[in-house]
Every structure is written in C-alpha cells, then in structure tokens.
Amino acid sequence: MTEQQLRIDLAATFRLFARLGMHEAVANHFSAAVSADGRKFLLNRKWQHFSTIRASDLIQLDADDPSSLERGVIDPTAWAIHGQLHRRAPHIRVAMHLHPIYATTLSTLADPTIKPIEQNTARYFNRVAVDRDFAGMADSEDEGARLVAMLGDKSRLMMGNHGVMVTAETIGEAFDDMYTLERACQILVNAYATGQPLKIISDAVAEKTARDWEGFRDFSLAHFAEMKRILDREEPDYAD
C-alpha cells in the first residue's frame, strides 16, 4: 500500500472515532508504519482534534530520530509510546491508543480483564496484555519502552488506570478491533452494573469463539471499508 493510501486510511480512523465519541479532547494518537523496516511511521500532530484531521496533516517520523520533539509538533506522550513501539517492535504496522469511556472504566478495576460473557467479549479471551503499573503520563522513552515490553506477544494492551492500545497489520483491522474492544467493554460494564452474577462462558467455548474471530479478517476490512464510504459521502475532505 502506498504512503498516500495509508495517510487516507489513517485520517479516516480519526474522523470515525471522533464520530463514535471515542476521542479524548485533543489527546491520543494513532500511528502507521510506512517503511518496509517499520521504523518510519505516520502520526497525528500535537493537539489537533480528531474530527479535523486530513491525510495531509499526518507527520512522517523516524523512530530513530527524536528531533521532531524539538520542533514542538509532536506530543511527548505520542513519541514516548509510538516512537518506542515502532523502534522496538518494527513488525507492528499500526498502533492506536485511546481512552474510550468503557475500556478506560474497565482499566480502573482491580480485575480489568475482559471476561467472556458473549461473543464480543469472547473475542478477547486470553488475548489482551494487562499493565497494572500506571505511573502517570507516559511521557518518557523509558515508559514507552516499558509499555512495549508489557504488550509482549499480544496485539492489545489494557493500560491499567489509563486506557487501551491495539496493534494490527492493517489500519482496517486496527479500527475494527478498537471498535469491538470498546463495545465488548461497554457490554461487560453494563453487565457489572446490574449487580447480578455474571454468566461467564466456559474457557473452551471462549477460546473457540476467539479463534473464530481471528478467522474473520475480511469482516474487519469490510467494516472499515463501509465506514469509509460514509465519510466519502459526508466528510470527503478527510482524504485531502
């Protein structure tokens, strides 16, 4: 995929998550690798609202060159997390970090795991790393490195008392994963709110469901494509 198409697709995700109310004022960041070695990547600039981001607004950075911070165009927390991720895990092509309401709510619980109680929550059975050591703003390279290490061999990180991060091979898959993860957390938080005991799916069924989800790559890509069609009609300037 060309850099221009990556820019267009990444810009679309910002617009879509703003529409979904999953943005955090002018904070939070998404990145997508543009080089074969994964070390050059696109990132949203400092303090630009998701609903205004266009493909041309995204900045290309080099994970080995922190000089962008000196120019004041990149949020230090964005560089700490995404710079270290693309430097230390160059196989990761896309990373999205958000503070969506339900996932963040779950991250504040003593047990922040996404328990399998239906098929959306079961998608994440044993497939989310959990960081329980929140230490304030993730604004240092050491903290970014720690978060990358916590991610380990998983593609999602529940950032305790903070938010969530998902990674993927493509922008479309990352978009669908973040969307479904937040929906799963909403379902679980609502279930907790009833005060009634949860009916948790068995490990065997939860594992089977999660594996079924992993075979639905075309579903994720179709979801993203359909959402982009809405933007093409209603907010076509995202692709500028």
Image (cartoon, helix red, strand yellow):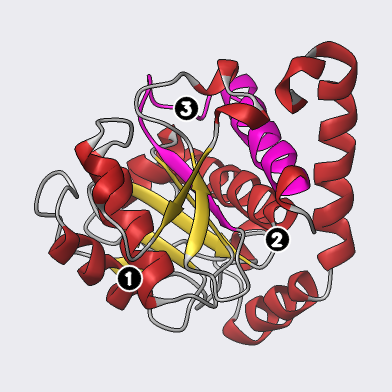
Picture coordinates of residue 233, whole percent (x, y): 90, 16
Decide which of 149, 201 is in the foreground and name it. 149
N-terminal of the two: label 1 or label 3?
3
Residue occupied by mark 1: 148
Specify start and end residues of the magenta stretch as a single range.
5-33
Residue 120's image quarter?
bottom right
Question: In this picture, is 80 found above or below 216?
Answer: above
Q: Which residue is located at x 35 percent, y 23 percent?
A: 47
Residue farthest to the top?
A: 234
Relative to 165, 108 lies left or right = left
Residue farthest to the bottom?
A: 204
Determine if the magenta segment contains residue 18. yes
Circle nearer the viewer, 3 or 2: 2
Query: Mark 2 near mark 1, Cβ–Cβ under 8 Å?
Result: no
**Quadrant (top left/top right/bottom left/bottom right) for the C terminus:** top right
Decide which of 227, 7 is in the foreground and name it. 7
User: What secondary structure is marked by label 1?
Assistant: helix
Determine if the magenta segment contains residue 108. no
Residue occupied by mark 3: 23
Can residue 171 be seen here?
A: yes
Residue farthest to the left?
A: 135
What is the three-letter code of the residue carrying label 1? Val
**How dense is the environment of label 2, judged by Cα within 10 Å: few (below 14), some, or many (20 and up)?**
many
Label 3, label 2: how many angstroms apart (C-alpha)?
20 Å
Relative to 8, 86 lies left or right = left
